[in-house]
């Protein structure tokens, strides 16, 4: 038996935006029905290098796996390396054999973007005219691409603290670089920054808008003003992760909001266990990133690689080596 090795370029060939949205939507529905196993994310702080590692195991149906991913804020400046890098190991739960080892960096960006698009599909207005992208780095591109899978004909409004970054993003996606206030006034707002100071104000958001808060993934991070959270219906991906490191972690710890005020999980809405919110309700999706999203997309990529004969097989465990007999 051999393990399939998939490089970044091969994952890029296989993992379309459509594939990512489909896999992540499936993961949310299964999670909402209680059909997935996902132990808590494990953090390994690397404080002396301004970073951390995260181990994210999960099992969904005929697949199990784990993602080993870092976040090192100074990587580009110090080493010329990406801030986030990841490797994914996909296993067969029946016999534990490693089916594949693949680049997890693009997988992470795609599944995160797809999570936002799935949230917009179930929580936002049916036909948004505008989508605001606040923070125009790598994540904004996958958020834009996956939203194109779900919605047609929207105008993209781009804002970034670095004006040239916003302009480049807008040029690439055919949108407009705008002010923060204008981007926050879109029908759907996607925030993807590492901010620890809330900067998206309640007064900028129009009633019935939907916000994908994608940036907060560690304790102390918060992008949305507490008043905005207090006035919105908040849907989370996972209670343990959201309360520990999601958009709600700071105001929850301060007592400004209560866990009892949460509207529910996105998985419950996708699975049909909770109704979609009323169109006049302002909604927030607090995304922390679920390991089941990774395993679902990794399996979809693996299956596509097998169908298309992409990748390189290796005898990783030495099981095909000749015996001594």
Image (cartoon, rainbow, N blue to C red):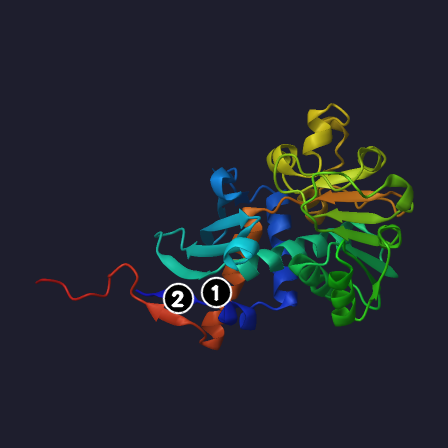
Q: Quadrant of the C terminus?
A: bottom left
Judge from the rendering whether residue 37 lies leftward or rightward of residue 170; answer left or right: left
Q: Secondary structure at mark 2?
A: strand
Q: Residue drawn at (39%, 60%), measured in percent from left and top?
A: 99
Residue 116 is situated, as x and y percent measured from the top left of the image, at 71, 53
Question: Is 143 placed above or below 208 here?
Answer: below
Residue sitting at 61 percent across and 58 percent down?
A: 109
Residues at marks 1 and 2, CA–CA distance in whole angstroms: 8 Å
Q: Quadrant of the N terminus?
A: bottom left
- Which residue is at the front of the view, 10 or 33? 10
Residue 299 image position (x, y, % from top left): 50, 60
Residue sitting at 80 percent across and 71 percent down? 174
* Residue identifier under label 2: 4
Picture quadrant of residue 112: bottom right
Q: Quadrant of residue 258?
A: top right
**Residue 100: which numbered mark, if any?**
none
Q: Is residue 247 visible?
A: yes
Mark 2 crowdedness (10 Å alpha carbons): few <14, some 14-19, many ≥20 = many
Would residue 163 appear left or right of 266 to someone viewing this image? right
Of 213 and 240, nearer the camera is: 213
Residue 120 x %, y %: 76, 53
Q: According to the image, label 1 marks what residue?
A: 302
Please provide percent x and percent y for residue 132.
Answer: 81, 56
Asked whether the beta carbons under mark 1 and mark 2 sit within 8 Å of each other, the answer is: yes
Residue 57 vs residue 83, the one in the foreground: 83
């Amino acid at each position: 038996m051999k393990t399939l090795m998939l490089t970044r370029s091969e994952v890029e060939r296989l993992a379309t935006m459509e594939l990512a949205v489909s896999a992540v939507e499936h993961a949310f529905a299964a999670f909402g029905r209680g059909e997935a196993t996902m132990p808590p994310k494990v953090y390994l702080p690397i404080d002396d290098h301004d970073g951390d590692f995260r181990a994210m195991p999960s099992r969904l149906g005929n697949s199990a796996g784990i993602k080993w991913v870092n976040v090192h804020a100074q990587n580009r400046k110090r080493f010329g390396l990406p801030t986030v890098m990841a490797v994914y190991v996909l296993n067969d739960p029946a016999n534990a054999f490693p089916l594949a080892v693949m680049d997890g960096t693009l997988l992470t960006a795609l599944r995160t973007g797809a999570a936002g698009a799935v949230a917009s599909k179930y929580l936002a207005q049916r036909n948004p005219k505008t989508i605001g992208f606040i923070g125009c780095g790598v994540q904004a591109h996958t958020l834009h691409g996956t939203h194109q899978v779900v919605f047609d004909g929207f105008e993209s409004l781009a804002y970034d603290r670095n004006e040239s970054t916003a302009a480049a993003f807008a040029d690439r996606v055919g949108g407009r670089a705008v002010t923060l206030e204008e981007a926050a006034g879109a029908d759907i707002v996607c925030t993807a920054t590492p901010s620890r100071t809330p900067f998206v104000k309640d007064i900028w958001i129009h009633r019935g808008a939907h916000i994908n808060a994608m940036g907060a993934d560690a304790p102390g991070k918060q992008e949305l003003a507490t008043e905005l959270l207090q006035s919105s219906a908040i849907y989370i991906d996972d209670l343990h992760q959201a309360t520990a490191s999601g958009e709600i972690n700071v105001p929850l710890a301060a007592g400004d909001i209560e866990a009892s005020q949460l509207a529910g999980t996105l998985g419950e809405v996708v699975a049909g266990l909770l109704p979609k919110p009323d169109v006049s309700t302002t909604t927030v999706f607090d995304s922390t990133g679920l390991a089941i999203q990774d395993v679902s997309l990794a399996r979809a990529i693996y299956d596509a690689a097998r169908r298309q004969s992409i990748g390189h097989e290796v005898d990783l465990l030495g099981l095909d080596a000749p015996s001594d007999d």
